[in-house]
Amino acid sequence: MKRILFLAMFLLTAQAQAPYAVEGLARYRGYYPLGSWEGKNPTAQGEVVWDGLEKASGRVCVRQEAWDSGNAERDKKALEIMKVKEYPLACLYPKRAYREGASFVVEGELEMAGKRRPVRILGELSQGRFRGAFTTRFSDWGFERPRFLFLEVRDEVEVFLEAEVRR
């Protein structure tokens, strides 16, 4: 009986630690004094291990050259600002993932252009689908802020994530 109980506990623990495949879309929204613009990147993919309670690990990355705002000149400038030739990936390294009321929170580090910064993503996880958002700043990364019609864009950028999460 002890062996069966031990085996059952082992299998449950192993299942909780099995990696989840993550694939999805990242979007951003930037602002300038007269409005805003958005870009998208459909290349988010990686693997995450979550213990079902709080501890998380793994990596989910996007290929930086895939950002598309619908404006080739703006995208070209953005790729220069983010040093994409030198740093082709931007990656999220989750450290914690947990439910907070109706929300699902992911905390970890975002790596971009050779720098890592803490990030807290507030979202929801339901039926194998994650949707979340966070705000970052050009200045957090040492990026120059682009100009639009000779007007400097706002420092804050909103980032939205949508992903399928499956074993």
Image (cartoon, helix red, strand yellow):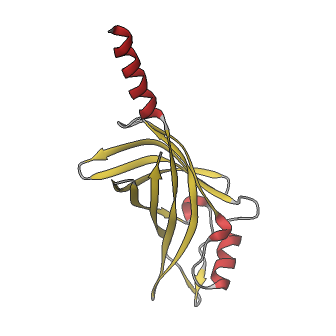
Q: Is 52 above or below relative to 118?
A: above
Q: Nearer the viewer, residue 89 or 148?
A: 89
Q: Quadrant of the N terminus?
A: top left
Q: Nearer the viewer, residue 70 or 159?
A: 70
The tally of labels here is 0
Quarter residue 149 falls in: bottom right
Q: Position of residue 143 (x, y in %)?
A: 62, 66
From this viewpoint, which residue is outermost toward the left?
Answer: 101
Q: Is 148 above or below relative to 134?
A: below
Q: Position of residue 119 (x, y in %)?
A: 47, 52
Identify the residue at horizontal 34%, vertical 54% (top origin). Answer: 127
Identify the residue at horizontal 39%, vertical 28% (top origin). Answer: 12
Q: Nearer the viewer, residue 166 or 104?
A: 166
Q: Is residue 54 left or right of residue 75?
A: left
Q: Is residue 53 left or right of residue 87?
A: left
Q: Position of residue 128 (x, y in %)?
A: 39, 53
Q: Is 135 above or below relative to 93?
A: below
Identify the residue at horizontal 36%, vertical 49% (top origin). Answer: 105
Identify the residue at horizontal 29%, vertical 53% (top origin). Answer: 103
Q: Position of residue 86 (x, y in %)?
A: 76, 60
From this viewpoint, which residue is outermost toward the right?
Answer: 85
From this viewpoint, which residue is outermost toward the top?
Answer: 2
Q: Is residue 79 left or right of residue 68?
A: right
